[in-house]
Amino acid sequence: MASLRDIKTRINSTKKTKQITKAMEMVSAAKLNQAENNAKSFVPYMEKIQEVVTGIASGSTNARHPMLQSRPVKKTGYLVITSDRGLAGPYNSNVLRHVFRTIKERHKSTDEYTIIVVGKVGLSFFKNRNMPVLDSIVGMDDQPEFADIKSIASEAVKRFSEETYDELYMYYNHYVSAIQSDLTEKKLLPLTDIGGEEQAKSSYEYEPSEEEILEELLPQYAESLIYGALLDAKASEHASRMTAMKSATDNADDIIGSLTLSYNRARQAAITQEITEIVGGAAALE
């Protein structure tokens, strides 16, 4: 049985851990509020740019662009969004496990795919498994600006146009609520899901030509999809970390309660033993 000193030491160390996890929970809660606002404020821009792109793509028979057209797939790109730090529950493991399983099912050789990864956790995961990482970005701010991911987003779109890969999938955690996030797989390129008459809400007259507008607008639209997914994923990350830290704090409370009970029992046993020894010694002197 552990000594009173050992139990007391464990209680004190658990209390210190609880203070840390409680502070991290509060910090994540504050970051979540801002990240959720960022993700929501970006939605109107995404809806408007999609409306314009859809209006051109579905309303004209002359407008054509390589990003809108499928081609034979020789190589697939995977854009995976993870975090730079752990302690976020299943936030990273859900995405990485799904991507890893998907790649193994779809491809027999590393020549058939390449990976673009956001986050140090994902980068370490793929490098440790000798999987081909084409590009990566780490050290992302908790409230990222578009300029922070402009380079990797524009390169991802540019490489599709250069036929480095023939399709690009994106994987991230979609924020639903503080206690729920959904693993999302989205085909980013080619942009085959923006057409359809039911999506075109407005008609426009274009100057210059529709082809020239698409040439400029489509890459921006694809980059915006990446940035929107990143904002969404950041909100999910903060929510997952807040939930994980709350669970850790609750577990610390349970451990402290259990250790306190053990400490009191051990202390009572020690006092009882001392009383017994005193009584026994007094009886021996009579």
Image (cartoon, helix red, strand yellow):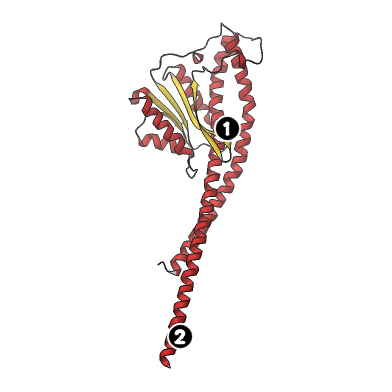
Among the 4 quarters of the image, the one containing residue 163: top left
Image position, residue 218 (x, y; %): 55, 17
Image position, residue 258 (x, y; %): 49, 61
Tell me what residue is drawn at x 46 percent, y 65 percent. 7
Tell me what residue is drawn at x 64 percent, y 26 percent. 44
Q: Is residue 238 above or below residue 220?
A: below
**Sequence order check: which comes first, mark 2 or mark 1?**
1
Amino acid type shown at disc 2: Val
Is label 2 in contact with label 1 (beta carbons under 8 Å)? no
178 with respect to 100 (left or right): right
Q: Which residue is mark 2?
A: 279
Q: Secondary structure at mark 1?
A: loop
Image position, residue 17 (x, y; %): 50, 55
Q: Is residue 164 above or below residue 278?
A: above
Amino acid type shown at disc 1: Glu
User: Which residue extends farthest top?
Assistant: 62
Please indicate, yes or no, whether residue 75 appears anywhere in the rendered image: yes
Please indicate, yes or no, whether residue 120 appears anywhere in the rendered image: no
Q: Quadrant of the N terminus?
A: bottom left
Q: Secondary structure at mark 2?
A: helix
Tell me what residue is drawn at x 47 percent, y 77 percent. 272
Q: Quadrant of the C terminus?
A: bottom left
Q: Which residue is mark 1?
A: 145
Among the 4 quarters of the image, the one containing residue 197: top right
- Local crowd size for mark 2, using a 10 Å CA cut-off: few (<14), some (14–19), many (≥20): few
State the residue in front, 193 or 44: 193
Marking on residue 35:
none
115 with respect to 221 (left or right): left
- Local crowd size for mark 1, using a 10 Å CA cut-off: few (<14), some (14–19), many (≥20): some
- Give the mark toward the camera: 2 or 1: 2
The Cα atoms of the two marked residues, 2 and 1, are separated by: 75 Å
